[in-house]
Image: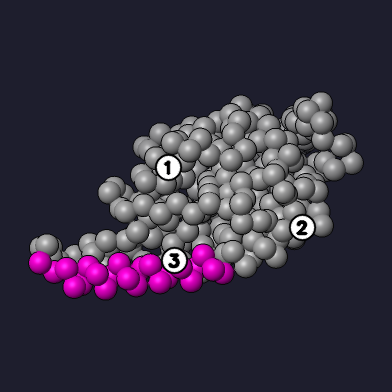
Amino acid sequence: MDKKILLVVDGSIHSTHAVTYAVRMSSVVQDLTYMLFYVQPTISQFLLDEAETDLKVRAELKRVIRKNAEFARDVLEKHKTRMVDMGIAEQRIETATQQKVMGICKDILDCAQQGLYDAILVGQRGLSRIQKAIMGSTTAKLVEHSRVIPVWVVDGDVTSMKVMLTVDGSEASLRAVDHLCFMLGGNEKIKVALFHVMPTLRDYCVINFDEKESDVRQVIAQGAKRCIDHFYAYAQHRFEEAGLQDNQIELKVIKRAMEVGKAILDQARKGNYGTVVIGRRGAGKAFFMGSVSRYVLNKISGRALWVVS
């Protein structure tokens, strides 16, 4: 079965990295097809209003529209040519462009939903924290508002094809397993690491318990172990259905010694994982909820992040 990727591009180096990653993933994900999608820049509302009554302005408006369309076609052709040169069959690549209608993020999501794409792939822009706070980030908005379709975010030139799936026993983690199985199913060579951070007492209660409260800690530890054991049993079943064998799956469990987001990034660096898969929201404060996925999204570097809602 073909896997359909909506590959959002522009003329930036970030899109070049995203396109390169998309091509490299064809060695890991079987039967990939691509739609290169470009949303054209906003046209000044003043120009639109004046064009209704002024013939010269109307002519200028047509020139701007034509210029934007030509630039879009050039960008799309450049990326398509690069993909073909890297070994992707031309018939597996489509291109599309449109003027911005509802906003870049909304237009991308509408295109993805209407086309029934399996993932949205976009390059991460190198914005500072202040810039993101002031004007926001298209990438962050896509992650926040894509309720059904997973978003793949590429930051930099990703060369490692190793995959790490972060799990916490939540429904979002289950969906992340399903998405990974669909994408990687049938690949006999890929190896996947499941990474779990054990919760602590402070993840459940703000009271500062002392070391004598061992009973509470033991209950939490036992409950967390049962949860991840049940989760892993489900994951193993899904991996088997997808054609992934036991020797292709590795479970890594660590005790929490730092913030969960930091632990994920630290493990990704240590293991040289090029792709990190995470549920957008998790089961509780300590787990992979929105704040953790946002932290990883903002801090990840030189890797790709698959965010599954």
Could you say which disc has been placed on residue 228 in the image?
A: 3
Residue at 62% over, 42% down = 122
Q: Which residue has dot 2 on it?
A: 115
Q: Amino acid at mark 2?
A: Gly
The boundaries of the magenta stretch are: 212-234
Question: Does dot 2 land on a helix, a strand or a loop?
Answer: loop
Q: Position of residue 296 (x, y in %)?
A: 43, 46
State the SS at label 3. Answer: helix
Colour scheme used in the picture?
Answer: one colour
Q: Nearer the viewer, mark 2 or mark 3?
A: 3
Label 1's element? Answer: helix
Residue 225 covered by magenta stretch: yes
> At which x and y percent is residue 156?
55, 31
The mark found on residue 267 in the picture is: 1
Q: Which mark is residue 68?
A: none
Looking at the image, residue 232 lies above or below residue 297: below
